[in-house]
Image (spheres, rainbow, N blue to C red):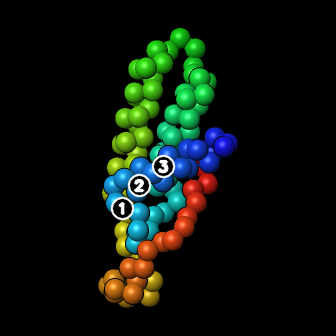
Amino acid sequence: TNLAQRAGDMVHARLLSHDRYVDLYWSTEAFHEAGMAALKLCLVDDRHVPAQVDLVDYRRQLEFDLRDAIARVIHSSELYDENDDGAIQDEEKTPIVEGRFIL
């Protein structure tokens, strides 16, 4: 799989692990930091790291960065008010069946 797909899958899995994916709406900008942190983690997994860095410490820092970025994404999420009436009705809480993150 390519790097972007792996990074997107990583972000998606983190969101699902927090049970905060279904019925939520996010601005695409909210994912930039999380996507970049996930992409860097994928590069580390492929042993593409900056020169003169401790691999373990660098990976740990990226994990923290991703965790923090996911927390910011979750914090920015909101229920999608389809009819824009200021209230969320039960029929507006239909789960998202499939989505894709493009980094």
Whole-percent x and y of residue 10? 50, 46
The residue tagged 2 is 15
Tell me which numbered mark, 1 or 2, is placed earlier along the sequence: 2
Relative side of 10 to 87, left or right: right
The residue tagged 3 is 11
Tell me which numbered mark, 3 or 1, is placed earlier along the sequence: 3
Please tell me how crowded label 2 is: few (under 14), some (14-19), or many (20+) other residues with Cα within 10 Å: some
Q: Is residue 8 visible?
A: yes
Which quarter of the figure is the N terminus placed in?
Answer: top right
Badge 2 marks a residue whose secondary structure is helix
The residue that appears at 46% across and 15% down in the rendered structure is 54
The residue that appears at 45% across and 23% down in the rendered structure is 58
Q: Nearer the viewer, residue 30 or 58?
A: 58
Q: Amino acid at mark 3?
A: Val
As measured in the structure, the alpha-carbon distance from the residue carrying label 1 to the one carrying label 2 is 6 Å
Please tell me how crowded label 3 is: few (under 14), some (14-19), or many (20+) other residues with Cα within 10 Å: many
Q: Is residue 36 visible?
A: no
Where is 23 relative to 76, above or below?
below
